[in-house]
Every structure is written in C-alpha cells, then in structure tokens.
Image (tube, rainbow, N blue to C red):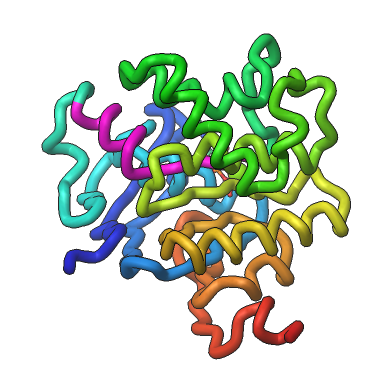
Amino acid sequence: MPQMVELIDVSRDYGDVDVVHALRHFHLRIEQGERVAIMGPSGSGKSTLLNLVCGLDEPTTGVIKIEGIELSRLDDDARTRLRREKIGMVFQTFNLLSTLNALENVALPLRLNGLGPREAERRGRILLERVGLGSRMAHLPDALSGGERQRTAIARALIFQPPLLLADEPTGNLDSATGDDILHLLDDLHREFETTILLVTHNELAAAYCDRIVRMRDGSVLREERLLKTGAEIEQ
Ligand SMILES: Nc1ncnc2c1ncn2[C@@H]1O[C@H](COP(=O)(O)OP(=O)(O)O)[C@@H](O)[C@H]1O
Ligand SMILES: [Mg+2]
C-alpha cells in the first residue's frame, strides 16, 4: 500500500521581494491509519503544510503525494474531486455556512458532488447521529454551541468517509471540557473508520492522542517523537 501522505523536499515561499520561507525542504511520510500531530509556534508553517496536503495551495518546489498520487499531475477538476472524496477538513473556526442548518451543512459536499437532496440528507442524518447531534439537525449554526458546531463540522468532513482527515487546531476555540469531548470523538472515529489523521494543535493532550508528534520551527522539522501510548489509552 502506498503511504497515505508523502511530502518530498517541499518548500513554500510567499512573496517575491520580502520572501517568507513558510516551509523549507520539508519531508513527511504518513502511513495509512496513522495519527500525526503537528506542533510548533505561530508562524512555523503548520497551516501552510495543511493547505499543501489538501491541494488548496501548491509548493514552490518539491513533490506531494496522496495515496501515491502526485497532486501536481492532477488538473483542477481532478484535484477538487480528490480533495472532496479523499480528504476531510476541520478548522478551528468551524467554517459552517450560517444560512444552512446543521443537516444542510453536512449534506452540502454530497449535493455539490451531484447527489440528490433526499439521499444526501439521509447520509447526513446518519453522521449527525453518529457525532451525537441527532436532535439538533435543524438548527442553524448560530443556535449551536461551539462543541456542537465542531461536531457538525466533523460530520461534514467525514461525509465521504475520507481516508484522510486534516484538522487545524480543532479544539482551539473550545473550552477544555468540550475540547476533550471532540478529541474523544476523533479517537472513536479513528477506531471505527481507520481514518488517517493529521492534526495541528497547540495542546499537548490533543497531541497525546496521536501516534507521532512532529514539532516544527521556522518551516522545518525541529524534532519528531513517536508515542508508545496514546492519550485515550493512558486515561484507561
Ligand atoms: N498567503 C500568505 N502570504 C504571505 N505570507 C504567508 C501567507 N500564508 C502564510 N504566510 C507566512 O508563512 C509563515 C507560516 O505561516 P502559517 O503556515 O500560517 O503558520 P502557522 O499555521 O504555523 O501559524 C508565516 O510567516 C506567515 O506569515
Ligand atoms: Mg495556523
């Protein structure tokens, strides 16, 4: 089986006069089903890394592969399709559409892929129930708590049962108890779907749920740690 994610000597520069080296000669390999936490101070290149992995941004130099497929060889349509079907994304700010209710938000990626409303909402309902929001599906995001919004965003990210989930500080805007709930949910989903997870976090506890921590500094890997026991196992 190919690696889930492979970055080979990837650099990303921004600007042409005052060049910012957001990523410098960066290497990363993530196996199928592995959970990797990316940690590092603000500005160290964590979001740049996620944007490159999901194909929203392109490297200045270097190669990025998802399940062995080189992103730069895909045209825009193929890359959009790959992103939609293979990669779920969860953000600190949830990024839900405020005019759509929870169910419509979750079903939207299926609708955009051409699925009819009835089937899209049927699948959306199953996932919202799975993340514990069965009774809140008709609520607009404004009427949901932070934790409920993040659950909705996670359900949306998983609507295609993607093999890869990217999360950029998913607990960053939540109080610690709600954040712990979200980490438990991700842990359960990982077990259930064997999803590969790439998690950016400032939180050591969140990182402890992962198999490996990659610590970044100035666009490079400062240090890597492999964890023998993950957070959930330690708690048990
Ligand atoms: N679109 C952009 N244009 C110019 N500079 C950028 C852009 N995006 C990020 N950067 C710069 O790249 C560096 C890494 O940013 P980022 O990946 O957002 O870091 P992190 O997520 O670790 O806080 C920072 O110095 C940031 O200012
Ligand atoms: Mg960031």
Image x and y of residue 57, in percent: 36, 33
Q: Is residue 116 left or right of residue 142?
A: left
Asked if one can make out residue 223 in the rendered structure from this viewpoint, the answer is: no
Please say if 217 is above or below 109.
below
Quadrant housing the N terminus? bottom left
Asked if one can make out residue 187 in the rendered structure from this viewpoint, the answer is: yes
Image x and y of residue 66, in percent: 25, 51
What residue is rendered at 68% in x and 65% in y? Answer: 206
Image x and y of residue 192, in percent: 49, 63
The kind of secondary structure the magenta stretch mainly shows is helix
Please say if 107 is above or below 211.
above
Ligand 1's quadrant: top right
- Indicate whether residue 35 is drawn in magenta: no
What residue is rendered at 44% in x and 48% in y? Answer: 49
- Residue farthest toward the top in the current orientation of the protein: 99
Q: Is residue 183 left or right of residue 216?
A: right
- Residue farthest toward the bottom in the current orientation of the protein: 228
